[in-house]
Protein backbone atom coordinates (compact mmCIF):
# COMPACT_ATOMS: atom_id res chain seq x y z
CA UNK A 1 0.00 0.00 0.00
CA UNK A 2 1.36 3.41 -0.93
CA UNK A 3 1.77 6.16 1.62
CA UNK A 4 2.62 9.80 1.45
CA UNK A 5 1.10 13.14 0.66
CA UNK A 6 -0.48 12.14 -2.68
CA UNK A 7 -2.37 9.27 -1.05
CA UNK A 8 -3.53 11.48 1.84
CA UNK A 9 -4.59 14.19 -0.59
CA UNK A 10 -6.60 11.72 -2.69
CA UNK A 11 -8.23 10.24 0.42
CA UNK A 12 -9.20 13.73 1.58
CA UNK A 13 -10.67 14.67 -1.82
CA UNK A 14 -12.66 11.44 -1.79
CA UNK A 15 -13.83 12.20 1.77
CA UNK A 16 -12.12 9.10 3.17
CA UNK A 17 -9.54 10.78 5.44
CA UNK A 18 -10.01 8.39 8.33
CA UNK A 19 -9.87 5.32 6.09
CA UNK A 20 -6.14 4.55 6.09
CA UNK A 21 -6.95 0.84 5.83
CA UNK A 22 -8.18 1.13 2.23
CA UNK A 23 -5.71 -0.56 -0.12
CA UNK A 24 -4.45 0.99 -3.33
CA UNK A 25 -6.70 -1.10 -5.60
CA UNK A 26 -9.79 -0.07 -3.63
CA UNK A 27 -8.64 3.56 -3.63
CA UNK A 28 -8.17 3.44 -7.41
CA UNK A 29 -11.64 1.95 -7.81
CA UNK A 30 -13.15 4.58 -5.51
CA UNK A 31 -11.56 7.36 -7.56
CA UNK A 32 -13.08 5.81 -10.69
CA UNK A 33 -16.56 6.01 -9.19
CA UNK A 34 -16.12 9.55 -7.79
CA UNK A 35 -14.86 11.44 -10.85
CA UNK A 36 -17.23 14.38 -10.31
CA UNK A 37 -16.34 14.79 -6.65
CA UNK A 38 -12.65 14.52 -7.39
CA UNK A 39 -12.85 17.12 -10.16
CA UNK A 40 -14.93 19.49 -8.02
CA UNK A 41 -12.49 19.22 -5.13
CA UNK A 42 -9.47 19.89 -7.32
CA UNK A 43 -11.15 22.86 -9.01
CA UNK A 44 -12.10 24.32 -5.63
CA UNK A 45 -8.49 23.97 -4.48
CA UNK A 46 -7.27 25.58 -7.70
CA UNK A 47 -9.43 28.67 -7.29
CA UNK A 48 -8.53 28.91 -3.61
CA UNK A 49 -4.87 29.21 -4.61
CA UNK A 50 -3.42 32.71 -4.83
CA UNK A 51 -1.62 31.69 -8.03
CA UNK A 52 -4.85 30.93 -9.91
CA UNK A 53 -6.78 33.84 -11.35
CA UNK A 54 -8.02 32.46 -14.67
CA UNK A 55 -8.99 29.24 -16.41
CA UNK A 56 -5.57 28.31 -17.86
CA UNK A 57 -3.75 28.40 -14.50
CA UNK A 58 -6.67 26.55 -12.89
CA UNK A 59 -6.41 23.73 -15.45
CA UNK A 60 -2.63 23.62 -15.01
CA UNK A 61 -3.13 23.32 -11.24
CA UNK A 62 -5.59 20.44 -11.69
CA UNK A 63 -3.34 18.68 -14.21
CA UNK A 64 -0.34 18.98 -11.87
CA UNK A 65 -2.29 17.53 -8.95
CA UNK A 66 -3.61 14.68 -11.10
CA UNK A 67 -0.03 13.87 -12.09
CA UNK A 68 0.98 13.72 -8.45
CA UNK A 69 -1.48 10.89 -7.83
CA UNK A 70 0.59 8.65 -10.10
CA UNK A 71 -0.57 5.04 -10.07
CA UNK A 72 -3.24 5.76 -7.45
CA UNK A 73 -5.58 6.67 -10.31
CA UNK A 74 -5.54 5.08 -13.74
CA UNK A 75 -5.15 6.96 -17.02
CA UNK A 76 -8.84 6.66 -17.90
CA UNK A 77 -9.91 8.15 -14.57
CA UNK A 78 -7.26 10.86 -14.83
CA UNK A 79 -8.60 11.85 -18.26
CA UNK A 80 -12.22 11.80 -17.04
CA UNK A 81 -11.37 13.99 -14.05
CA UNK A 82 -9.47 16.42 -16.29
CA UNK A 83 -12.46 16.66 -18.68
CA UNK A 84 -14.90 17.28 -15.84
CA UNK A 85 -12.53 19.81 -14.28
CA UNK A 86 -12.33 21.70 -17.60
CA UNK A 87 -16.12 21.98 -17.64
CA UNK A 88 -16.22 23.18 -14.03
CA UNK A 89 -13.44 25.68 -14.66
CA UNK A 90 -15.28 27.04 -17.71
CA UNK A 91 -18.33 27.65 -15.51
CA UNK A 92 -16.26 29.59 -12.98
CA UNK A 93 -13.90 31.48 -15.29
CA UNK A 94 -15.32 31.63 -18.82
Image (cartoon, rainbow, N blue to C red):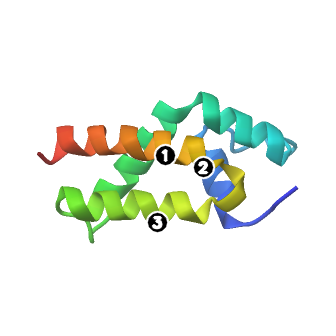
Q: Tell me the number on the disc at residue 79.
A: 1
Up the image or down, 45 lies above or below 67; here it is above
The N terminus: image quadrant: bottom right
49 displayed left or right of 64: left
Q: Residue at x 58, y 65 (%)?
A: 68
Front of the two marks 3 and 2: 2
| Identity of the residue furthest to the bottom in this view | 51
Q: Residue at x 61, y 55 (%)?
A: 9
Which residue occupies the foreground of this view, 19 or 53?
Answer: 53
Q: Judging from the image, what secondary structure is the residue with disc 1 in?
A: helix
According to the image, label 3 marks what residue?
A: 64
| Identity of the residue furthest to the top in this view | 33
| Identity of the residue furthest to the front in this view | 76
Q: Residue at x 46, y 32 (%)?
A: 36
Q: Earlier in the sequence, mark 3 or mark 2?
A: 3
| Label 3, label 2: how far apart the Cα atoms are | 14 Å
The C terminus: image quadrant: top left
| Label 3, label 1: how far apart the Cα atoms are | 13 Å
68 displayed left or right of 29: left
Residues at circles 2 and 1 in contact by the CB criterion of under 8 Å: yes
According to the image, label 2 marks what residue?
A: 75
Amino acid sequence: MSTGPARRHLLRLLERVADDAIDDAALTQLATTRVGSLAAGLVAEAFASDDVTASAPAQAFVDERLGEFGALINAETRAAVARRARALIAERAP
